[in-house]
Amino acid sequence: MLEHELLINIWFVLWCVIWAIYLVVDSFSLGAGMLAAFMPKNAGQLVQLAKSVGPFWSGNQVWLILAAGGTFAAFPLIFSRMFTWLYIPMMLLLIAIILRGICIELIYDGSNKKLQKVFQYGWALGSLLITVVLGVAFTNFFRGMVIEPGYVYAGTLLGLFNVHALLGALLFVLFFVTSGALWAAHKTTGELSQKCAKFAKTPAIGVAVAALIYIIALFNTDGFAVNYNDYQFFYAVPLIAVVFALACIVLTLKKSDKPFLGFLANLGTIFFGAATGVVTLYPAILKSSISPEFGVSIFDAASSHLTLTLMFYAAVILVPIVLVYQLWSYTRFKEKIAEGEH
Amino acid sequence: MIDLTDIVLLSRFQFAITVFFHFIFVPLTLGLGAVVASFEVAYWKTKKEKWMKLAKFWGNLFKINFAFGIVTGFAMTFQFGTNWGPYAEFMGDVFASPLALEALIAFFLEGTFFGIWYFTSHKKPLLKAFSMVMVSVGTMISALWIITANAFMQNPVGYEMAADGSKILLTNFGELMTNPYLWYMLSHTLLAAYFLSAVFLVAISGYHILKKSNADIFRISLKIGVYIMVISALLLPGLGMFYGHYVGEVQPVKAAAIEGVWESGADKPMYLIQVPSDSQGKNIIELLPIPYVGSFLLTGDFRGEVTGLNDIAEEDRPPVALTFFSFRIMVVLGIAFILQAFAGLFLVLRDPTMESSKARKFMKLAIYSLPLPYIAIALGWVVAEVGRQPWIVYGLFRTSDAVSTIPAIQIIFSMGLLVLFYLLLFVLFLYLLKKAIVAGPEGVQEHA
């Protein structure tokens, strides 16, 4: 049996890893969704774009549900407060998830052109909303929320959408659009592929610019850098993210015939970018911007030893199995997708 | 009138709306999913075209239903946090593990393999069949976990109260899984889902047989539907009886509300016509008693001793009339389903072509009867969840203590948004379903 404190720490790491996987794997389906608003020239290209993520997005989205369910199982108090305090954003996220999911599953049938248009913009709007809420929420987590003693939230709805959070939303949009464009460029053929490869250059550079401002603003936020100062080797994480971001720019500009390389680099940036933020949360996933001791610490929020042990073994056994069959599913759809007849 | 500042009521309404909307799609996901998986396997094994046609047509309807079903399910998980925060904190240690396991085991299977199935053509029948089987298995595992969680709310087991009384802690996961409530509820839910799916098969097959389009194919699915109807319609009340006795044992107050028993005592009759009144604390109409049957239904013993609602403090009683009538109507529908199933069996066995005028009438009636199993299932959930009130966890935690302190206006806003959105989605769902049904097997496009 593992010691309780160790188990809680392991669950914090698992929490971070599950979120980072989610952001990585849904980045390109959300990105493709946002591109759907303006990239496809016609219905044939729209279906082509949708098919590039069609077989994968719904399995990828489950990582979000696992992130929520895992938070609930390991840290019920954090789950409860996170969702209650972000009530309106969470409700918007819910509606966006439903909108995106239904639109993308039904977009392929071209027999009703008007409805297909509705699904096209529904898919785009849903994807944009999910991305924006995630960007706003994570920025607020990284900055710390207005938490008073006794886990009382004293912030306002408008306060959640501060300038920094909006910059976070923009950053997430740029990340995901880059991801979606490079994936579509890799996965499709013909005009759409070329357009996406060309388009990706702008958000790839945009990511670097926005991320730089965003990170500087974060490190200037009270309490953000505590863990970095205590454990200086953590500085490696943002450094790796920067290397990936630069690699992504170079690959996207110089190797536009091989968009998959730039795509992988961008995923690396997302993973380590997310890690850059989440390492500062420890030991409180919900930090307080008023004073560190008011945050909801994982040690106060953790489930019992039995629950954590049980869920730990479940995760250790099942997550690799899931990863294996999800990766296998990509090998079932190797062919590049051509423009449909429409 | 609804008090618009009562956040408990508002949150309950919002939860009810989202869960009932979600459950429109659940039964077909479970039942039709298994049927489509069987068609896919039959095609892979035999390579006969009829199985492929059936798999394509019914798979297409499954697909539409699944697209709406999966994502609307997220609404409950979200609300445990947004609207039921104190509940999440009190229950999380026990309740959240099944939910997380559901995501880990079931949702990943469903989500990943649905994508594979959707985009695989029948030129690869093995992969097509295998992925659909995985989806179907995923849906059933999902049902198992979510009902494990619900069964705990009905009959809490395998836990202890934390020293400070602020929350409960898991002590025995095995007890959670061997909770008898789980297995009664799961079998009842699955059987009801299979019955509904069978009526769906019969009604839509009948529509095409009546139209004489692909009648040879649809006679197969009609026959399969009728057989499933007969088996599930018979098993439902059979198992339901034991389920009822068990509810009488572990949830005596809910059981008393189900039968409208106000005064404690033995040898209780059942009244065929009965109208309970919450405000008067008695039945205002009691006609046509059947001696001892009331006692039998609640205890399994014709002379059994039953606790009446008037011996329960008023604040510990559920809404009696709502629970009572929901149960009664469900049971009446259940009896009608048995008659319908046997009428179908009789007709199919006598003339498999279904061309007699009686068979035509049966098929027409089946189309109009399609909403009934949906209503019966919804009422069943009303009995289970409203009958559990005022407890959110039976005997342990009150619904009124479980709600997050959210400004009422925000709940009204989110609920209004959801209702509008869901109405649009429901119209869209009916439109797409109808279109796919009318188009028949020829109208199905494959996206591989």
Image (cartoon, grey):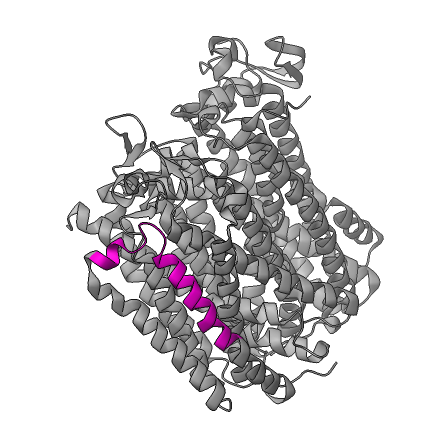
The number of callouts visible is 0
Q: Position of residue B128 (x, y in %)?
A: 53, 74
Q: Position of residue B150 (x, y in %)?
A: 44, 38
| Magenta region | A203-229
**Vertical relation: B309 (above or below) B36:** above
| Quarter of the rendering containing residue A129 | bottom right
Task: For residue B325, say whether it is visible.
Answer: yes
The residue lying at 66 percent from left, 69 percent from top is A37
The residue lying at 51 percent from left, 32 percent from top is B241
The residue lying at 36 percent from left, 51 percent from top is A70
Left or right: where B108 falls relative to B415 = left
The secondary structure that most of the magenta stretch takes on is helix
Task: For residue B178, say whether it is visible.
Answer: no
**Vertical relation: B71 (above or below) B257:** below
The one nearer the camera, B353 or A214, is A214
| Quarter of the rendering containing residue B413 | top right
- The answer to whether residue A218 is magenta is yes
Left or right: where B195 falls relative to A291 = right
- The answer to whether residue A221 is magenta is yes
Left or right: where B6 falls relative to A204 = right
Q: Position of residue A98 (x, y in %)?
A: 59, 55
The one nearer the camera, B263 or B400, is B400
